[in-house]
Amino acid sequence: MIELINSEQDLARQNFPVFVPTMGALHAGHQSLIKLGKSLSESVLVSIFVNPLQFENQDDLAKYPRSLEADLKLAEAAGAAAVFAPTVEVIYPAEIKKISAGAVADLYEGAARTGHFAGVLTVVKRLFDLTKPKFAIFGEKDFQQLFLIKKMVKELELPIEIIAAPIIREPDGLALSSRNVRLNEADRKAALIISKSLQESNLQEMHKVLAQEPGFKLDYLAEIDEQTFGPVSANTQNKRVIIAGWVNGVRLLDNKSMGSGA
Ligand code: PAF
């Protein structure tokens, strides 16, 4: 049976070189992160903590799926050595300092969710301090989150290598997300327009595809420079299209590399 760790003291007694932070509701996407971790070391630690600081909307926090028993099984099946599932008190003792996430944190996901990335960086830094990993693995689906975590690690000179794991999709193209469980059959069908639009070669064509689906409400569709998260310029090495929107009140994200050059 996989080991379940709840306290800072029990965690400190062990050494896990690879760390996969999650908010639970594990699915095949998380399992792919754990499996990638196993290719780096035998000892992979998964954390499960629904971080109140990154939810600006209390309803969203209350509705976030919680399934510890099933999560333990999925983490074990993917090869994790242990799960760290702390309480809010363990993560946020009184003295925790909130990390400021900088200007990129106000764009895109940050524009729609004020304070979200400061909450993400604060919990990730706290989790890193507690777990002290050599490698930490994050999915590319949350591309802006990945960018900001890499930036924080660089700026704070943390001795941790951030590993990016590719998006895992359903056979029909839908990017795996813990939020997908909130989609009914019709929503699930409407959500397919997101990955379908990303098959086009430019933003104009993507907009045309998205306009075909009345069940999808676009928030943003943008092409960004992967190094700066700013607009593509003559100096751009790698480009990426990022997209977010709602299907029946469920926020969904996706992105795709658009190759190199401006
Ligand atoms: O991507 C997530 O699941 C969360 O934002 C993270 C990185 C675990 C921080 O709570």
Image (cartoon, rainbow, N blue to C red):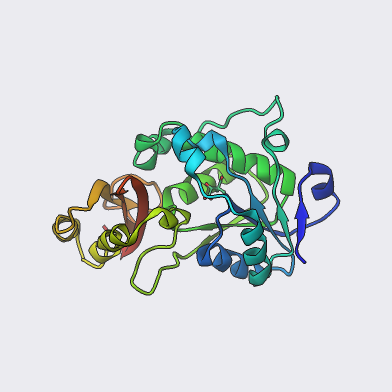
Q: Position of residue 93 (x, y in %)?
A: 71, 29
Please identify the quarter of the rendering in which residue 172 is found.
bottom left
User: Looking at the image, which is closer to me, 240 or 32?
Assistant: 32
Q: What is the number of callouts on the image?
A: 0
Q: Is the N terminus in the top left, top right, bottom left or bottom right quadrant?
A: bottom right
User: Looking at the image, which is closer to me, 115 or 68?
Assistant: 68
Q: Give me the residue at 75% from left, 64% from top.
A: 2
Relative vertical location of residue 86 with respect to residue 4 in this rendering, above or below: above
Q: Give me the residue at 69% from left, 65% from top.
A: 80
Q: Position of residue 104 (x, y in %)?
A: 40, 38
Residue most extreme to the bottom: 171
Q: Is residue 258 left or right of residue 140?
A: left
Q: Give me the residue at 31% from left, 51% from top.
A: 224
User: Looking at the image, which is closer to me, 182 or 191?
Assistant: 182
Q: Position of residue 227 (x, y in %)?
A: 41, 51
Q: Position of residue 163 (x, y in %)?
A: 56, 60
Q: Is the C terminus in the top left, top right, bottom left or bottom right quadrant?
A: bottom left
Residue most extreme to the right: 13
Residue 238 in view:
no
